[in-house]
Image (cartoon, rainbow, N blue to C red):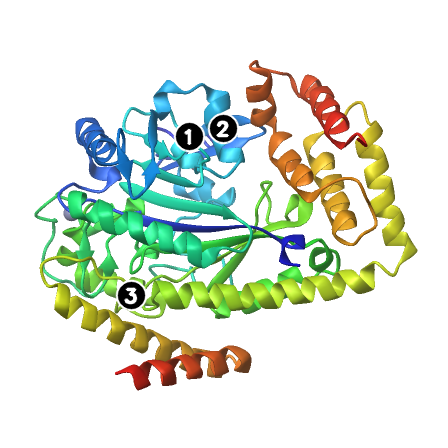
Amino acid sequence: MSDAVIISSRVRLARNLRDYPFPNRMSTSQGEEIAEKVREVMCGKDFCGYKFMAVKMEDLSEFDRVAMVERHLISPEFAAPDSKKLLITTENEEISIMVGEEDHLRIQVIIDGFELEKAYEIADRLDTELDKKLHFAFDKRLGYLTQCPTNLGTAMRASVMLHLPALKESRTVARIAANLSKLGLVIRGAYGEDTESVGAMYQISNQVSLGISEKSAVENLRSITEQLVNSELKTRESMMQSFEYQDKIGRSYGILITARLINHKEAVRLLSNLRMGICEGLIEGVDLATVDSLMLKIQPASLMRLKGTRLSPEERDRVRAEIIRSELRPR
Amino acid sequence: MKCEKCKSREANTHIKKVVNGEYTELRLCSECAKALGYDNVFDLEMPDMFGGLLQSFFTGALPARSGASRCPECGSTYGDITNTGKVGCAKCYEAFYSELLPSIKRIHGSASHCGKVPLRAETLEVEVNSAENELKSLKTQLQKAIEEQNFELAATLRDKIKEMEAEK
Ligand SMILES: [Zn+2]
Ligand SMILES: [Zn+2]
């Protein structure tokens, strides 16, 4: 049962048009020209079997842009209101293309669950079709050419988002991090500012992209993820023997369904405990999908987007508690 | 433009981030950026954040000169690239190949691409190459896995290599 641990899989490819300078050196008109070209190729018809729509970042409200960052659809870098920045997505947002980020194109596929191969297969197909029309910069020695040398080679980042409450609690994440870096992988907290992840959500991705093929990088990540899932589940099993821990989970649920004011950090921490309680059979009547969608919904900008208005931090705490209560209420 | 933090040094780092639901931008000098934990890969003394893979992009011996002082395509100098942390265009990689190479090797532990090659005119050659590339990549990884004593991974890789060599 890997959905107890694995939230989603993602593959991202960086690509640049060979006939234009990289984003830091291009003019506004060159940037708009590229955006227009990509839009022409992808939108208004079937492309690779998908229907895409495009939106200029400058046409969106701040809530909308920041909420996109909160649900990991775009990078903070891309949230700037800028006429060169165009976001192309499918309706369900599984596939997205950021045009005018750190590279001309960032092709991204995010799929719920453990679907690395499928995510790569889609990204690869899109890349092949796009290259026929846009002609990406490539060098035999260095692979796909990118604005930052850290992305050279395949220019691919594959990642999985994992919920690792037991490994976090037992303080093994730091040790794992050191070992992962030897294998060319990196682990980071998926939410929050600091390296310490709020809510025990982590993202593991490949750090090296030159000298390793896409296929090998994906397989590497898959095999490491499987090992992590196993050790997380084992650690959970022994942790759940303790009444102290069972109590902590029960109390978390209690607070979530009764609180009238709750800040973001506390909510994420308690939802993380609840999520583990559900997976371990301690809490019944709430499904994982509800918890996962709450994790996204209760972030500050996402709340304001939902309400369609700016809210003070105190108002957000109230609205957040209200949403959590109504979604977790036993049916 | 002056740095927004110390208000004295020239700002050269543009940070965009989301804090508590709000989009914010900061323009900082490299010292203040470093103090706040925003290093870029071209920084000289990057802390060993992720166990060393990304560290110190430009430490070590002075890079060799490949002759070009400006990229003929976009006009970047090598100094522009290290200051901004960004390469100017695809041609820069040709113009400053020997200067960039040591850093590229340091980041990736390799400087030869394996993996996808875009389909262009030479379709046939490309197909052969990508199978060979794949094999090359697997072998490098096997070596690494053995060094790391990750025998589980090594066994899987060895089987893959056998399989691929049999197909040839
Ligand atoms: Zn400063
Ligand atoms: Zn250039």
Q: Distance between the residues labelled 1 and 3?
A: 31 Å
Residue situated in front as seen by the camera: A33 or A152: A33
Q: Residue A79 carries which label?
A: 1
Q: How far apart are marks 1 and 2 (CA)?
A: 6 Å
To which chain does the residue with label 1 belong? Answer: A
- Side of A155 relative to A176 (left or right): left
| Pointer 1 with pointer 2, Cβ within 8 A | yes
Q: Residue A66 carries which label?
A: 2
Residue A48: x and y in percent read: 29, 44
Q: Residue B3 carries which label?
A: none
Residue situated in front as seen by the camera: B74 or A23: A23
Categorize mark 1 by other alpha carbons within 10 Å: few (<14), some (14-19), many (20+): many
Q: Which kind of residue does numbered mark 3 sit on?
A: Gly
Which residue is painted at 29% across and 60% down in the image? A153
Q: Which kind of residue does numbered mark 2 sit on?
A: Val
Q: In this view, does B99 lie above or below B25?
A: below
